[in-house]
Each structure stands twice: as structure tokens, then as C-alpha cells.
Image: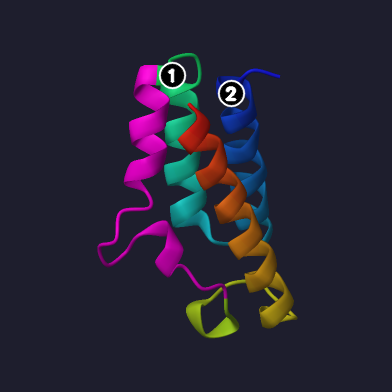
Amino acid sequence: MNEVHEAVEQLFTLERFLRQHAVTGWADRIRDVRVTSHNDRELLKPAVLKMYRGTMGSLTDLIISRVNGHEVEDETAVNIQLDRLQDELWECAQRL
């Protein structure tokens, strides 16, 4: 599987995971990146990496919790899975 296809698949997996837990804002943002740059490595890499920038509101700041209005039962398990998906997407983007 080429790097672009792998990154697009990772985006789709993360988007689906976020929608499952009613994290619609981030799911929509990820969908937009996936749809607008899915065939272009030069657009995809910076678009994905931009979501990880160390500023407030970055993807890595996201915490899935009932307090935030998300649909979740086991917050610890879901956030461990979220961290794993974020790490996998980051690794894919680095290979682009």
C-alpha cells in the first residue's frame, strides 16, 4: 500500500472513530482533509501535520469524555485508543 493511500485510510479510521463517539467537529475537519487532499501527497502531508501543531486546540489536545458531550462509556479505554490512532496517523504523515 502506498503512503498516500495508507494516510487516507488512517484519516478515515480516525474520522469513523470520532463520529462513533459524537466528536463531530474533529470528525468533520478530518473528513475535509481526507476529501480535499486524498490524491495529492503535497497537500495531504501539511494538512495532516497542521492538525498536530503544538498550539491550543490541536488534535493531540482532544479528550473524549462525557463532560465534553461525547458518547462514551469507558473514557480511559477510548482515550487510549484515540492516542493510538493519533500516533498511527502521525507516523503515516511522516512517511509521506
Q: Which residue range is magenta in the image?
A: 42-64
Pick the residue in front: 35 or 93: 93
Does the segment drawn in magenta span residue 4?
no
Q: Is residue 68 above or below residue 46?
A: below
The residue that appears at 44% across and 55% down in the rendered structure is: 25
Q: Nearer the viewer, residue 86 or 12?
A: 86
Q: Is residue 67 left or right of residue 79?
A: left
Q: Give the residue type at disc 2.
A: Glu
Q: Is residue 23 left or right of residue 42?
A: right
Amino acid type at image mark 1: Arg
Tag 1, which secondary structure? helix
Name the residue tied to disc 1.
41
Closer to the camera, 30 or 4?
4
Question: Which residue position is annotated with label 2?
Answer: 3
Separation (CA) of disc 2 from disc 1: 9 Å
Indicate yes or no whether the magenta region holds residue 45.
yes
